[in-house]
Image (spheres, grey):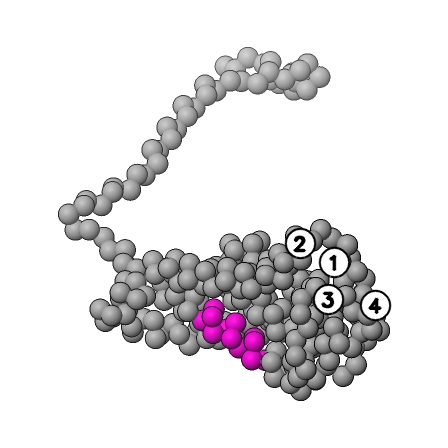
Amino acid sequence: MRAPDFSADLYRDITEFAHRTPPWTHPVAEVGTDAGLLLFAALFAAGWWRARRADARAMGRALSAPAAMVAAYLVSEISKTAVQEERPCRAVAGAMNIAACPPPGDWSFPSNHAAIAAGSAAAIVVAWRAMAPLVLPLAALMAFSRVFVGVHYPHDVAAGFLVGIAVAAAAALLLARAAEPLVTALRAVPAGTALLGPPPAAAAPDAATPRPVPRHPRPRPRPYPRPWRRRRLPPRHRPRRRWWCSAAVP
């Protein structure tokens, strides 16, 4: 497969910009991808430890996160073998790559590093939604670093990122649903309790504690009726006296 021209041009622009950056940024960008993967591994462990105090559904999602990342990597690797796109550090004339170019046969499309980073971020977000503002920008930065060091085209990392997000999120949800009854069964035995944590205690009413008496609203006092007052009509509305009304009654 031949890379599109727009992606090759963008690759040249990014690698030329990378060579103009200070020299200390080059090893940071080269090592940063692997360091980011270690951070994701630490977050997997932190998510498992956090889920030990939660229910079986949360523990199932925490346990399925690494497996979902592996599923995203496998889909990316199979796609890479099927497409067989040459690395830009060999295909682009005058490529200014910072990192060493991978050997022939290590294809470029899609980027496995981008798929692993995005898959890890998606799986962590499924299990621990509050970590999304941290892991998603970190995965995007790790994917961009593969273009920065000159070993991938921009469309390689974009495709790998999308594959990782889609595959890992779907796999994490499916595996978590399948793992939930297994977690419930394992927590019933001592070894599973030590590994996965005890099941959350059900809230049961204590017999020794008296139940609070419900407070009813106090009835509002009925207002006293106002004294009857005769309404005095204006003169033009008063009834006219008739002559028979003024006659004396015998």
Closer to the chain start, of discs 3 and 4, is 4
Disc 2 marks which residue? Answer: 25
CA distance for labels 3 and 1: 9 Å
Report x, y in % for residue 48: 39, 63
Disc 4 marks which residue? Answer: 9
Q: Secondary structure at mark 2?
A: helix
Closer to the chain start, of discs 3 and 1, is 1
Disc 1 marks which residue? Answer: 18
Q: Which mark is residue 227?
A: none
Residue type at numbered disc 3: Asn
Q: Which mark is residue 97?
A: 3
The dominant secondary structure in magenta is helix
Closer to the chain start, of discs 4 and 1, is 4
* Disc 3 to disc 4: CB gap under 8 Å: no
Quadrant placement of the N terminus: bottom right
Query: Between residues 222 and 33, which one lies in front from this camera angle?
Result: 33
Residue at point 56%, 58% (across, down): 135
Q: Tell me the magenta residue range.
A: 64-75
Residue type at numbered disc 1: Ala
Report x, y in % for residue 76: 61, 78
Left or right of residue 206, residue 174 in this image: right
The relative height of residue 20 versus residue 71 in the rendered view (above or below) is: above
CA distance for labels 2 and 1: 9 Å
Residue at point 68%, 82% (across, down): 104
CA distance for labels 4 and 1: 14 Å
Near mark 1 (Cα within 10 A), the count class, few <14, some 14-19 or many ≥20, is many
Report x, y in % for residue 37: 53, 64
